[in-house]
Image (cartoon, rainbow, N blue to C red):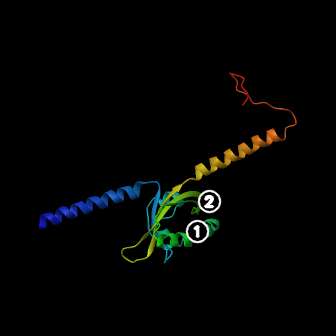
Amino acid sequence: YVYKKTQYQIKIENSEKQYRLVSENVSDVIWVFEIISRKFLYVSPSIYKLIEKTPDEVMKGTIEDILTLKSFQYMEKVLPGRIMEFQSGIKKDYVDELENIHKSGKIIFVEIISNYKLSEETGNIEVYGITRDITERKLADEKLRENEERYRLLFEHNPAPMLVYERNSLKML
């Protein structure tokens, strides 16, 4: 019996080490949010790389402390529908693009993938999520849109006729 218990404890300890290794070394932020208390129950250490706040700071604060007003209002709007879907048995992942507030005040664009679960301990609905920094992608997309718009306006408002063709074959594009 003592041997089996020791083997079981070793397996649990190894599992906990693997979990810590993953949760402490990924760049994405892993988190658990309880709906009824409107508090984070868990936030991975990678939150510090994202917004320069410790997991403890985030868990002691509110959701409003890390979301812009626009993103908070969006979540307030979609949350009731998602809760209703979950309560009616629909289980799915949700993908949202939101804005987080860095400790310095700058805006960080994030993609959040989340799903809803019922806590076995409390019976409360919890949201399990992963947050990824997409700031570079959003800024590149915006720059591309601006360039496309500038190019479109150049063609639309140029009084001289213009042709675009492939250099080697001279085919008009």
The quarter of the picture where the N terminus appears is bottom left
Q: Is the C-beta separation of discs 1 and 2 under 8 Å?
A: no
Of residues 32 and 117, the one nearer the viewer is 117
Report the mark closest to the observer, 1 or 2: 1
Q: Which residue is mark 1?
A: 78
For label 1, count other residues whose C-alpha is less than 10 Å away and answer few (under 14), some (14-19) or many (20+). Answer: few
Q: In the drawing, does residue 93 fall left or right of residue 1? A: right
Q: Amino acid at mark 2?
A: Lys
Distance between mark 1 and mark 2 Cα atoms: 25 Å
Q: In the drawing, does residue 7 fall left or right of residue 166? A: left
Q: Which residue is mark 2?
A: 106
Residue 110 coordinates in the image, percent (x, y): 56, 57
Residue 167 coordinates in the image, percent (x, y): 70, 24
Which one is earlier in the sequence, the residue at label 1 or at label 2? 1
Identify which residue is drawn at 12% across, 63% down: 3
Identify which residue is drawn at 51% across, 75% down: 38
Residue 153 coordinates in the image, percent (x, y): 79, 43
Identify which residue is drawn at 72% across, 46% down: 146
